[in-house]
Amino acid sequence: MPNLKEKIQTISSELKQQLAHLSQEKELEALRLSFIGKKGAITELLGELKNLTIEEKKEFGPLIQALRQEAEDGIAARKKFITEQQSQAADNQARHFDVTSYVPNAPTGHLHPYTLFIEEIQRIFLSMGYEIWDGPEFETEFNNFTALNIPKDHPARDMYDTFWTDQEGYLLRTHTSPVQARILQQRTPPLAGIAPGRTYRHEAVDASHDFMFMQCEGLLVDKNVTVAHLFATAQTFLRALFQKNTLDIRIRPGFFPFVEPGFEIDMRCIFCKSGCSVCKQSTWIEIFPGGLVHPNVFKACNIDATQYSGLAFGFGLTRLAMLRYGIDDIRLFHSGKLKFLEQF
Ligand code: DAH
């Protein structure tokens, strides 16, 4: 019966080959069933024995029994090998203790509400084609006042309670408008940008006044810039910031020495429909002062006012952030109180 002999050999080599590749106990069980389970290949061979002659039984009986033993031993050995490997892997993992690894419940730091808010404002103006500018907080009297059409004896200087410094001609800037003067002295139009930053005023501190607060200046200079551009800019910005496509603005005349004409741009109160304490019962919130750049500002900065016109605005960034986030006390911004900061 060369046929049966071949069969035994094939099964034996298949068994060895499959065993060598197994790495899971589940696979090992499947293999056991397919060789020595009820319907396994070796079990079937044993079943065939009864059809053989006595001579053949004597020859193949022991061979098949040996094959069965081989399968049992092979499976047991492989099982031991797999278990050893698994415990070794678990061991290695336990030993690799990584002190820098992530701790799920550790509190992480985050950006200050000012930073978050400035980034939001910058994104909106960048999308309108504005650049981001910066200027020093320690400023010259010329840039802060004189270049902005506020000469030494001008009563408008009374609007600003200035922190003067020991150094003659220098002060802590009272608004972000001096960045306008700096840009106009350095660049040739067309130009457009915003300059968010800190400003200082010698004021008594209460819930709505601080001696240091933030403003954001805006300036756009080109040929034929009109008030329509200013109003559209204000409306586009405020609608994007408060995510309200129907937010209305209203325009009133206002006085600022560095613009002519000058305006107060108000927006509809975002908290009420018929009057509340935020809008002082008027349903309008004064938010966005601006105007067209005064020819005297152009003159002081050597820009030809007959060729160019420009729009300028300078809103209170701190005040806007308070409205945007519903903060009712300005002092919280610099308090370092975690209960406040952790809400952002
Ligand atoms: N600098 C002004 C202030 O602090 C705000 C301002 C008003 C800026 C009108 C402007 C503007 O550029 O056009 O009160």
Image (cartoon, grey):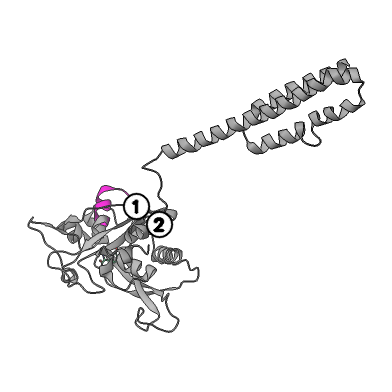
Left or right: 126, with 216 as reference point: right
Q: In this view, does 314 lie above or below 276?
A: above
* Magenta stretch encompasses residue 44: no
Q: Position of residue 137 (x, y in %)?
A: 20, 56
Q: What is the magenta segment's predominant secondary structure?
A: helix
Tell me the quarter of the picture where residue 52 sits: top right
Residue on which the image places disc 1: 132
* Magenta stretch bounds: 180-190
Q: Pointers 2 and 1 in contact (CB under 8 A)?
A: yes
Residue at 41 percent of width and 53 percent of height: 126
Q: Nearer the viewer, residue 75 or 158?
A: 75
- Residue located farthest toward the top when viewing the structure as drawn: 2
* Magenta stretch encompasses residue 186: yes
Look at the numbered disc 2 and give the secondary structure of its residue.
Answer: helix
Q: Which of 29 and 287 is in front in this view?
A: 29
Q: In this view, does 196 lie above or below 46?
A: below
Q: Distance between the residues labelled 2 and 1?
A: 8 Å
